[in-house]
Image (cartoon, rainbow, N blue to C red):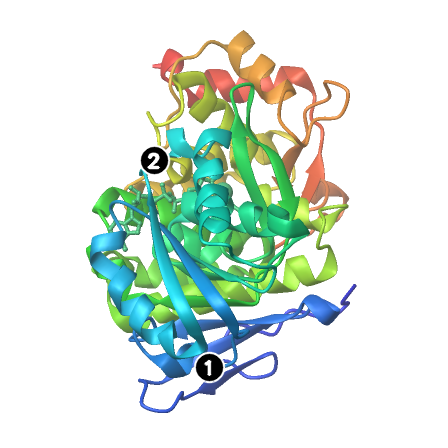
């Protein structure tokens, strides 16, 4: 476990755990280091990384590699990646899975094993996950299980995957009875965030990724929240410098949290700010109706209201988060599922213990008792009456 303190937020290339690097022949990029002992790895952030062989020079060599992607991403980026990594392997195969959360299941996972076994892949074969969080989670889980573990590399191509899902080693598939319920902690060898891939991302997916970026401010770094507010128009316009700063800082904060608590025994749970309400919305409407990031955006508003009702933050903070989430193109009012359904869904959340719902609240206790307010977060249960008040105030039934 690392006890390192989070380096202060800085514009441009970071120092300390992060440093500016220039791979031969590449535009300048930054590297964030995630410190997990012998499972440590770098996260590269910058333009023009995907098609540059130098990006992958330190990856494990083997007879074979398999690029796992999906039918949407494959025509855009699979050939570039294949050419960049081909010096390292005798054979590189590409497997394009069907696109969508609905395919993050056991049957689709088997397609990866079919491909690996069909091409007599051995235990040194390296898997490359090229795509969003769905491809990343499935490929990581396949890598954890194939021959009890083969190396894998994350090449995230959505904003959400670059700032969150590709970092930290959570891998999973869905089960008909629950999302991400079958999985493993399994760290990649390298994460490559090529910012150029974000240029083809649909605008709704861009906003979904912004939700996970916004979450890092209130839980860990209010200077970063200030920066996001100022730079939101640039982020929405996909300004390369703004995206580079946002992705790099998000990865630094995630690396800092995961470095202290790799398997979510404690502090890692703060990364779920907004997720208890958000998951209930996603599940309640049926997966795919709202994107994960949309649920998280609205969930952060709801969790902030709950923090205020607990006396942990003031009204101004709730207004601030609501304004920012809305400006990012995300919903701030939950659908009308009814309070009982919300409560039932939240009791089934992975963080719940014995039916006791755990929320990520902003702060560490009542302001009146010296609580720290925004910039820290605590996982905590809350009086049901207050949760019901929040549901009444923040869902469509309130209108
Ligand atoms: N492992 C973790 O720690 C973690 C954290 C957060 C979320 N997740 C998981 O991540 C998943 C969501 O990830 P996501 O938001 O990336 O969704 P996604 O993987 O479904 O990607 C969203 C859409 O964008 C398309 N796409 C991807 N890259 C593109 C590009 N560059 N240009 C154009 N289209 C592109 C995809 O094909 C897909 O249609 C969920 O399954 C969630 O459970 C995991
Ligand atoms: Zn999330």
- Answer yes or no: is residue 85 visible: yes
| For marks 2 and 1 on the same chain, the one whose residue lies earlier in the sequence | 1
Query: Where residue 227 is drawn, which disc sits there?
Result: none
- For the point 58% across and 62% down, which residue is it? 151
SS class of the residue under badge 2? loop
Q: Residue 188: horizontal and vertical position, in percent?
A: 57, 61
Q: Is residue 174 above or below residue 261?
A: above
Residue at the disc numbered 2: 100
- Looking at the picture, does residue 65 appear above or below residue 394? below
Q: CA distance from mark 2 to mark 1?
A: 31 Å
Q: Quadrant of the N terminus?
A: bottom right
Q: Viewer-proximal residue, 277 or 79? A: 79
Q: Quadrant of the C terminus?
A: top left
Residue at the spot 39% in from the left edge and 18% down from the top edge: 285
Quadrant of the image where one finds ligand 1: top left
Residues packed near mark 2 inside 10 Å, few (<14), some (14 to 19) or many (20 plus): some
Say left or right for 116 vs 378: left
Residue drawn 33% across the image and 71% down it? 50
- Residue 170 in percent (x, y) is at 60, 48
Pointer 1: residues within 10 angstroms few (<14), some, or many (20+)? some
Label 1 SS? loop
* Extreme-bottom residue of the structure: 24
Q: Is residue 46 visible?
A: no
Compare residues 148 and 32 and report the one nearer the observer. 148
Up the image or down, 65 lies above or below 286; here it is below
| Mark 1 lies on residue | 57
The percent position of residue 32, horizontal first and vertical second, equals: 53, 73
Residue 28 place in picture, x, y as percent: 36, 85
- Left or right, 261 with respect to 190, comes to right
* Left or right of residue 317, residue 242 in this image: left
Q: Is mark 2 within 8 Å of ligand 1?
A: yes
């Amino acid at each position: 476990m690392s006890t390192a303190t989070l380096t202060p937020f800085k514009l441009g290339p970071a120092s300390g755990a992060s440093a500016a690097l220039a791979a031969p022949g590449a535009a300048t990029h930054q590297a964030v280091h995630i410190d997990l002992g012998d499972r440590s790895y770098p996260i590269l952030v910058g333009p023009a990384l995907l098609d540059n062989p130098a990006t992958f020079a330190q990856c494990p060599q083997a007879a074979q590699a398999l690029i796992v992607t999906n039918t949407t991403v494959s025509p855009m980026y699979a050939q570039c990646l294949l050419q960049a990594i081909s010096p390292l392997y005798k054979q590189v195969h590409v497997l394009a899975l069907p696109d969508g959360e609905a395919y993050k299941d056991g049957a689709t996972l088997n397609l990866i094993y079919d491909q690996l076994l069909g091409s007599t892949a051995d235990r040194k074969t390296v898997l490359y996950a090229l795509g969003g969080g769905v491809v990343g989670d499935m490929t990581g889980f396949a890598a954890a299980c194939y021959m009890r573990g083969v190396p894998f590399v994350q090449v995230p191509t959505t904003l959400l995957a670059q700032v969150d899902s590709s970092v930290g080693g959570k891998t999973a598939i869905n089960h008909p009875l629950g999302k991400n319920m079958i999985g493993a902690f399994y760290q990649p060898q390298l994460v490559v965030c090529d910012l150029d891939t974000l240029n083809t991302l649909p605008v709704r997916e861009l906003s979904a990724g912004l939700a996970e970026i916004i979450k890092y401010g209130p839980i860990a770094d209010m200077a970063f929240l200030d920066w996001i507010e100022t730079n939101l128009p640039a982020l929405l316009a996909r300004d390369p410098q703004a995206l580079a700063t946002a992705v790099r800082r998000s990865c630094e904060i995630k690396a800092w949290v995961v470095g202290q608590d790799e398997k979510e025994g404690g502090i890692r749970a703060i990364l779920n700010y907004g997720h208890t309400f958000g998951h209930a919305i996603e599940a309640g409407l049926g997966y795919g109706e709202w994107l994960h990031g949309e649920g998280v955006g609205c969930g952060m508003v709801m969790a902030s209201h709950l923090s205020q009702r607990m006396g942990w933050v003031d009204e101004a903070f709730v207004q601030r988060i609501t304004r920012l989430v809305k400006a990012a193109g995300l919903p701030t009012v939950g659908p009308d599922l009814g309070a009982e359904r919300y409560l039932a869904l939240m009791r089934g959340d992975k963080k719940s213990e014995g039916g006791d719902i755990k929320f990520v609240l902003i702060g560490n206790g009542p302001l009146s008792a010296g609580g720290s307010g925004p910039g820290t977060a605590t996982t905590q249960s809350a009086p049901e009456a207050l949760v019901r008040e929040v549901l009444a105030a923040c869902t469509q039934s309130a209108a």
